[in-house]
């Protein structure tokens, strides 16, 4: 009888769980267009605009201004992946070793993001796979994570070059 009551109690708790989605039923996003991302970001107070101009990425990218800096969110061609990226140029001869150390430390200590150096500068990237389905709450969490990571990363890579 105790087992039956325990199972019944667990079943009741499972059914009685509150809905964690902001609106019921919880919408699941499996793909996203740049227009949908722009609308979502604007609705949530982010300073964004469509990227203009020519080039492969222009029709897919959102320009996102964070703390006065320009960053980008690229929507994959098939709409199943988002890539946040930001970059700063620097004198690689003067600061290359220092930037390598900064990137290595970042990649060792941070989750969900990567920092690296190429011939264009030092980069921060975060990506989100949406092809398996995400909620709007997941998307908002990802964007907040991008914003927070950029806020922490920026002084690390900008400060050394200001001396």
Image: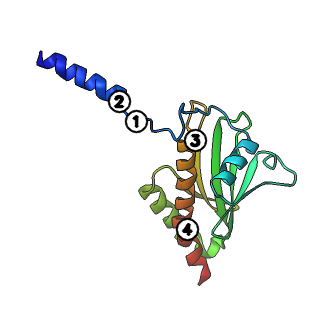
Q: Label for residue 63?
A: none
Q: Which comes before the other along the chain, label 2 or label 4?
A: 2
Camera-near label (4 vs 1) is 1
Task: Give residue 103's position: percent from left, percent from top.
Answer: 52, 62
Task: Give residue 139's position: percent from left, percent from top.
Answer: 57, 44
Camera-near label (3 vs 1) is 1
Residue 125 against residue 82 in the figure, above or below: below
Q: Residue furthest left?
A: 1
Q: Are marks 2 and 4 in contact (CB under 8 Å)?
A: no
Residue 114 visible, this angle: no
Task: Give residue 65's position: percent from left, percent from top.
Answer: 68, 63
In this image, 41 relative to 56: left or right?
left
Q: Which comes before the other along the chain, label 3 or label 1?
A: 1
Query: Dot 2, how many residues are within 10 Å of its Cα: few (below 14), some (14-19), or many (20+)?
Result: few
Mark 4 and mark 1: span between their CA atoms? 47 Å
Q: Residue at x 64, y 39 (%)?
A: 81
In this image, 13 relative to 32: left or right?
left
Identify the residue position indicated by label 2 in the image: 16
Task: Give residue 110's position: percent from left, percent from top.
Answer: 45, 56
Q: Secondary structure at mark 1?
A: loop
The N terminus is located in which quarter? top left
Identify the residue position indicated by label 3 in the image: 136
Mark 1 and mark 2: span between their CA atoms? 6 Å
Q: Secondary structure at mark 3?
A: helix
Q: Quadrant of residue 95?
A: bottom right
Identify the residue position indicated by label 4 in the image: 99
Of residues 154 and 144, the one drawn nearer to the viewer in this rendering: 144
Query: Dot 4, how many residues are within 10 Å of its Cα: few (below 14), some (14-19), or many (20+)?
Result: many
Mark 3 and mark 2: span between their CA atoms? 23 Å
Identify the residue position indicated by label 1 in the image: 18
């Amino acid at each position: 009888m105790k087992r039956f009551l325990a199972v019944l109690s667990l079943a009741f708790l499972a059914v009685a769980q509150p809905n964690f989605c902001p609106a019921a039923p919880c919408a699941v996003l499996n793909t996203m267009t740049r227009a949908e991302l722009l609308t979502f970001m604007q609705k949530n107070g982010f300073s964004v605009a469509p990227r203009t101009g020519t080039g492969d990425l222009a029709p897919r990218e959102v320009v996102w201004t964070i703390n006065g800096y320009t960053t980008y969110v690229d929507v994959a061609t098939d709409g199943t992946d988002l890539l946040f990226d930001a970059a700063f140029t620097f004198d690689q001869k003067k600061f290359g070793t220092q930037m390598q150390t900064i990137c290595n430390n970042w990649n060792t200590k941070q989750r969900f993001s990567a920092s690296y150096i190429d011939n264009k500068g030092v980069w921060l990237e975060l990506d989100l796979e949406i092809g398996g389905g995400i909620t709007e709450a997941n998307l908002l969490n990802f964007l907040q994570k991008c914003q927070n990571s950029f806020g922490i990363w920026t002084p690390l890579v900008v400060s050394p070059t200001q001396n």
